[in-house]
């Protein structure tokens, strides 16, 4: 049954990395919204909608990350052997190679949304 554990750790690494990345990006976008509100209070209601969306995403993906670790680490007991840890780290690293290149464009997009004229 070790192959089931390794497969689960591969999926866990990818899903945990994605949830962490999305939660982190939502946090960065919340900071950008706060800067936008401070810089231009006239757009408060529009920016408040963006804040609500980003806070909802932050909450959703943070809870997803907590749930993933609760299920895989606590409930299933995975990630304790060196091979399971290595499988997790390999897929987490590969997932980062996929998601990290989009950071700049996502930050640019939220900044454009915040600074655009009404």
Image (spheres, rainbow, N blue to C red):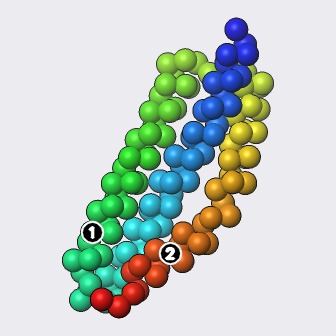
Q: Please identify the quarter of the rendering in which residue 17 is found.
A: top right
Q: Is residue 89 above or below residue 75?
A: below
30 lies above or below 82: below
Question: As drawn, is 70 to the left or to the right of 93?
Answer: left
Please provide percent x and percent y for residue 106.
54, 69
> Which comes before the other along the chain, label 2 or label 1?
1
| SS at badge 1 | helix
Q: Residue extending furthest front? A: 118
Q: Give coordinates of residue 18: x percent, y percent.
A: 57, 47
47 left or right, relative to 73: left
Image height of 30 relative to 79, above or below: below
Disc 2 to disc 1, C-alpha distance = 16 Å
Residue of label 2: 109
Q: Residue at x 49, y 25 (%)?
A: 71
Q: Nearer the viewer, residue 103 or 38?
A: 103
Name the image quarter holding residue 92: top right
105 vs 60, nearest the viewer: 105
Q: Nearer the viewer, residue 18 or 79?
A: 18
Estimate the x, y position of residue 44 in percent, counting from the top left. 24, 80
> If the image is split into quadrants, where does the C terminus sit?
bottom left
Q: Is residue 25 left or right of residue 58?
A: right
Q: How dense is the environment of label 2, judged by Cα within 10 Å: few (below 14), some, or many (20 and up)?
A: few
Q: Position of residue 25 (x, y in %)?
A: 50, 61
Q: Under tag 2, what secondary structure?
A: helix
Residue indicated by mark 1: 49
Give the numbered dot on residue 79.
none
The answer to whether residue 79 is visible is no
Q: Residue at x 47, y 53 (%)?
A: 23
* Residue 106 visible, this angle: yes
Q: Residue at x 44, y 39 (%)?
A: 64
Above or below: residue 105 compared with residue 66: below
Which residue occupies 73% across, 46% down?
93
């Amino acid at each position: 049954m070790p192959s089931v554990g390794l497969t689960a750790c591969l999926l866990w690494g990818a899903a945990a990395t994605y949830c962490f990345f999305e939660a982190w990006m939502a946090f960065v976008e919340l900071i950008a919204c706060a800067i936008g509100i401070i810089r231009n209070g006239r757009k408060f209601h529009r920016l408040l909608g963006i804040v609500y969306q980003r806070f909802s995403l932050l909450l959703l993906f943070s809870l997803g990350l907590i749930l993933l670790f609760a299920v895989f680490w606590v409930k299933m007991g995975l990630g304790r052997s060196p091979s399971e840890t290595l499988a997790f780290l390999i897929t987490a690293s590969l997932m980062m190679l996929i998601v990290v290149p989009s950071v700049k464009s996502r930050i640019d997009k939220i900044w454009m949304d915040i600074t655009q004229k009404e």
